Image: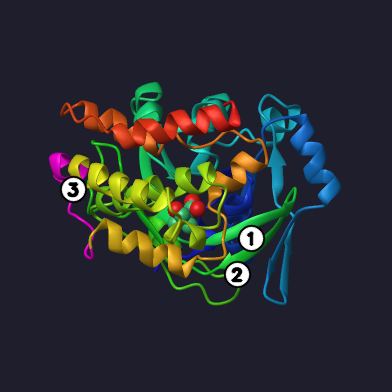
Amino acid sequence: MTSLSSYPWHICGAGAIGSLWASALASHGANVTLLLKDTAQLAQYQAAGGVRLLEGDEQTHIKPDALIPNSRAAVNHHPQKIKHLLVCCKSYATLDAILPWRKYLTHDTQIVLLQNGMGSAQRLQRALTHANIYCAISTDGAWRKGPFDVVRAGDGETLIGSFSDHLIAAEIPAAIQSLCQPMVNEPRLDIAWRTDIRTPMWHKLAINSVINALTAIYQCTNGELINHPQGRPRLQQLCIETQDVMARLGIVPLGQGLPNTAVRILQQTALNKSSMLQDCQAGRPTEIEAINGYIIQQGALYHLPCAGHKQVCEDLRRIYAI
Ligand code: KPL
């Protein structure tokens, strides 16, 4: 039986989900190191005095090592290699986040990408041809109250599977197997291995692609999109286009169909703002390229115009000048 404490994890991307994972892994005995962007982020980390996670009434406080690229600490204190790397940054930031650490990666480093959208794993594989890349998707909810100060908004499930062609899809590496053991105390993550991770990744992408941009365009909560006079017909159109692209790629359709699933998720998360609306309102870059942009790009391979997806990309750029 493999134990979490046997595997050191480096975590790149210390936002809400990265902090949640750092808290859960460290609380279960794993040796966690945060890979931060720069001196400014390191100063924020030092000022925060570690990572805090609030879950209901329970607060977890951890103080893992934190490194920045090319720092003396990274060179001296951390001559050892990165064996297990969890990447939780936004998909558009992936290469900039990982490549500064490439000299610490080995031929057998396992890189797990836990992000919204698609395309970053392919780009990373092109940049690091021999990298062992795994992809994960999650329905965990967490939001950032401040730097390294995170609130858990809801328990979800995380699925992990292999991405790189040279990996055997049924072979679960021991370090990932240790993540899949039931976690005994809070904060708990519910993690499972999937031999075919592409299917659930596409299902999540499909949901995000029909909800997120529209809520950002109409600046509405998820629940308000359900009966939005302009938004709802556009949602239907996006569902049709997305299902067409998935059918051409041979992706198994969502069990209840995309429109029904999207409405169910909108109902379940009625009071929430989508992650894209939150990014737009905070003036951050969005994941539109990795979500709707990816569907347009895949559709183009089959000469599918994806006009509704193109229109939401254009609307979003116009409204938020991005
Ligand atoms: O994942 C989401 C997000 O906001 O990114 C949901 C809530 C499913 C909306 O697409």
The answer to whether the residue labelled 1 contacts the one labelled 2, judged by CB atoms less than 8 Å apart, is yes
Q: Dot 3: within a 10 Å radius of its alpha carbon, few (fewer than 14), some, or many (20 or more) residues?
A: some
Q: Dot 1: within a 10 Å radius of its alpha carbon, few (fewer than 14), some, or many (20 or more) residues?
A: many
Residue 251: assigned label: 3
Frontmost residue, 244 versus 180: 244
In this view, the mark in front (3 or 1): 3
Distance (Cα) linking label 3 and label 1: 35 Å
Location of residue 129 by image quarter: top left
Secondary structure type for disc 2: loop
Disc nearer the start of the sequence (1/2):
1
Q: Dot 2: within a 10 Å radius of its alpha carbon, few (fewer than 14), some, or many (20 or more) residues?
A: many
In the rendered view, does 41 fall on the left or right side of 93? right
- 38 is within the stretch colored magenta: no
Q: What residue type is labelled 3?
A: Ile
Secondary structure type for disc 1: helix
In the rendered view, does 196 fall on the left or right side of 281? left
Q: Which amino acid does label 2 sit on?
A: Pro
Frontmost residue, 146 versus 102: 146
Is the C terminus in the top left, top right, bottom left or bottom right quadrant?
top right
Can you say whether 100 is above or below 239 in the image? above
Residue bearing the label numbered 1 = 23
- What x and y, as percent, mark residue 181? 42, 69
Residues rendered magenta in the picture: 246-256
Residue 187: assigned label: 2
- What x and y, as percent, mark residue 134? 36, 44
Frontmost residue, 276 versus 45: 276
- 250 is within the stretch colored magenta: yes
Q: Residue at x 62, y 52 (%)?
A: 16
In this view, the mark in front (3 or 2): 3
Q: Which amino acid does label 1 sit on?
A: Ser
Is the N terminus in the top left, top right, bottom left or bottom right quadrant?
bottom left
